[in-house]
Image (spheres, rainbow, N blue to C red):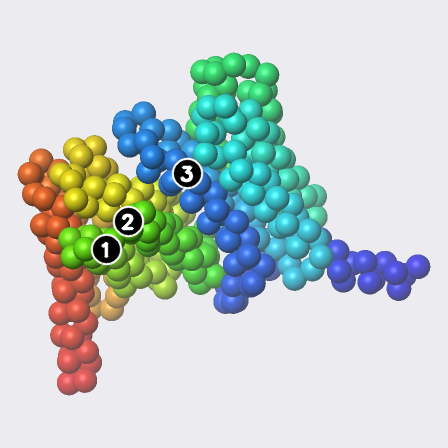
Amino acid sequence: MSLILRSYRKWWQTPRNSSERAEHRQVTFLELFYDLVYVVLIAELTHALAHHIDLQHIAEFSFLFIITWWAWINGTLYHDRHGNNDIRTRVFTFLQMFTVAAMAVFAHDALGETSAAFAVSYAAFQLILTFLWWRTGVHDPGHRPLSRPYSLAFLITTLLFVASVFVEPPDRFTLWLVATVISIALPLFLLRLRRRNPAMQAQFESGATVTASMVERFGLFTIIVLGEVIVGVVHGVAAYHDIHWRLAGISALGMAVAFGTWWLYFDFVSHRIPRQESMWVYVWSYAHLPVTAGIAMVGAAMVNVIEHATDPLPVEVRWLLVGSIGIVLVGIALLIRTLPPRANAADAHRMGQIVIFCVAVVIVALGFSTLETIPLLGSIAVLMLMPVAFGLIYWIKHTETVQQ
């Protein structure tokens, strides 16, 4: 019996204690597989927006993207802090993936005819996370000051989504909104509450440490949404039977926007640990939401930009393009603010933020222009190169200083 119990514990382990969190580890193939299912969900949301560009559908996309991002970040955080290389972790990860895949099936009209099915799918995901966070407190008493309020909040939001199935829109979506606000505000509420609870304070200080693996996971999620920009270009071009020079030029510039976004994020933000104070960690985490949502909206815009390659660019497409790029750049500037400056580079650190923010303002201002598609995309690409050039100049000067 003892041998059976030892074998069981080996393959079905308890959640890893928060104090045993590995600061240096490689992202596992299971985590990469988990991220893959979000590719499909985000693609469905982006494609739905690409076919209906107006303020209502942009707001709906943003709302559904927040729900998607919240699901991803909680599944990701749980695995990073409490996951093990055992059967239990794999089973519960696969269960989450089932529910996210179900969300993707109903995402194309999640605020319409398929809203009830989407709510059930998301409630199932939330229920799994509720159980997982609750179990961490059962096996790790020191983690209970955080696991209990998290579990309670997850249970409340789960019940709100379940209850929404039994009411008609728009009341259904009001319940979704209330649940989402509770979810997003919970960490910030607990951040203030911790000052009155020493045990909670200790758990916050432990959990506020961002590991290299978490930085990598956020970078991978950013790549997932960047893929939507590439997909937007490809889908737009594939709709044409004949490829002419104008279409080729617009497509190339669309790819250049994707390349510029990648360059800015992965040179200025990725591979760097944010400041370790709790507030900065939360700002760093939450700032990724507008960055990734904005990139996905750029993908939706690109489909329409290329679709109108032979026509004047519609006003709504122009504003979605410049507005979403502006959101991305402002988010990247905010992310840079959360990072500690490199040695002897405080001025460059501050100037990098200013340059990116100013570029964002100028790009958004292009929405008022009457530039045709190619000059507009060309201007955006050149403007996005300015922070890149600034970074290269700093790197060259810094390298020369070190060598001297």
Tell me whether circle 1 and circle 3 mark residues in contact (CB < 8 Å).
Answer: no
Is residue 390 in sight in this rendering?
yes
Q: Tag on residue 45?
A: 3
Kind of residue at disc 2: Tyr
Query: Which quadrant does the N terminus fall into?
Result: bottom right
Q: Residue furthest left?
A: 370
Q: Position of residue 340 (x, y in %)?
A: 29, 59
Q: Nearer the viewer, residue 235 or 337?
A: 235
Q: Amino acid at mark 1?
A: Ile
* Mark before the other along the chain sequence, 3 or 2: 3
Reading the image, the residue beneath label 1 is 243
Residue at the (56%, 43%) spot, across then down: 101
Q: Nearer the viewer, mark 1 or mark 3?
A: 1
Mark 1 is surrounded, within 10 Å at the Cα level, by few (under 14), some (14 to 19) or many (20 or more) other residues, namely few
**Disc 3 element:** helix
**Separation of marks 2 and 1 at Cα, in angstroms:** 7 Å
Q: Earlier in the sequence, mark 1 or mark 3?
A: 3
C-alpha separation, residue under disc 3 versus residue under disc 2:
23 Å
Is 89 left, or right, of 306 in this rendering? Answer: right
Instruction: Tell whether 323 sits left or right of 212.
Output: left
Residue at 15% in and 40% down: 311
| x, y percent for residue 131 | 66, 39
Mark 2 vs 1: CB contact within 8 A? yes
Amino acid type at mark 3: Leu
Camera sees residue 351: no
Which of 134 and 165 lies nearest the eye of the viewer? 165
Question: Label 3 neighbourhood size at 10 Å, few (<14), some (14-19), many (20+)?
Answer: many
Rendered image: mark on residue 240: 2
Q: How far, Cα to Cα, is label 1 from label 3? A: 28 Å
Is residue 175 shown above or below 9?
above
Residue at left offset 14%, top offset 46%: 373
Residue occupying image coordinates x 26% and y 66%: 342
